[in-house]
Image (spheres, grey):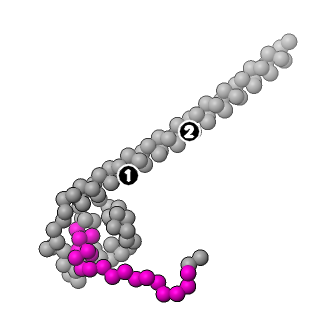
């Protein structure tokens, strides 16, 4: 349950906003990933992108650090790989569960079949 009282509101500089918007325009990187890496809500970043389109925030003079862009791309690649491994892991768990239930079922039917023929 939230604590009653005034909420903390953060004020971000125009430079921070412009840099965040520029990072969100890096090819292969989504708005959500940039927002997560900057610890801001994706809606806030989308609003800043809209403000840049409307000219309220100027992002043309902001230089992007190549290391930050490369880090975001690497983060995206690692997240994709992680998601794929998670899917593969779940699939293997289901396969193991299926084969173990098949063995248990087939072994029960073969033992009861032997008993009924005697």
Residue contact at pointers 1 and 2, CB within 8 angstroms: no
For image coordinates 43% across by 48% down, the residue present is 83
In the displayed structure, 76 sits above or below 59; it is above
Residue holding disc 2: 93
Residue reaching furthest to the left: 61
For image coordinates 57% across by 39% down, the residue present is 94
Residue holding disc 1: 79
Task: Answer with the quarter of the image where residue 14 lies.
Answer: bottom left
Q: Residues within 10 Å of mark 2 (few under 14, many from 20)?
A: few
In the image, residue 15 lies at what x, y percent? 22, 76
Residue reaching furthest to the top: 118
Q: Earlier in the sequence, mark 1 or mark 2?
A: 1
> Horizontal placement of 25 versus 81: left or right?
left
The answer to whether any part of residue 55 appears in the image is yes
Distance in Å between CA atoms under marks 1 and 2: 21 Å
In the image, residue 17 lies at what x, y percent? 27, 75
Question: In the image shown, does 2 or 105 lie closer to the viewer?
Answer: 2
Q: What span is in magenta?
A: 3-22
């Amino acid at each position: 349950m939230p604590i009653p009282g005034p909420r903390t509101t953060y004020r971000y500089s125009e430079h921070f906003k412009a840099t965040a918007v520029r990072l969100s325009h890096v090819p292969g990187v989504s708005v959500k990933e940039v927002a997560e890496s900057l610890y801001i809500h994706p809606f806030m970043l989308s609003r800043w992108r809209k403000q840049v389109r409307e000219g309220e925030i100027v992002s043309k003079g902001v230089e992007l650090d190549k290391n930050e862009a490369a880090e975001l791309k690497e983060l995206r690649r690692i997240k994709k790989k992680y998601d794929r491994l998670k899917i593969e892991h779940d699939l293997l768990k289901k396969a193991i569960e299926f084969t173990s239930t098949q063995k248990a079922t087939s072994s029960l039917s073969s033992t009861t079949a032997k008993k009924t023929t005697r």
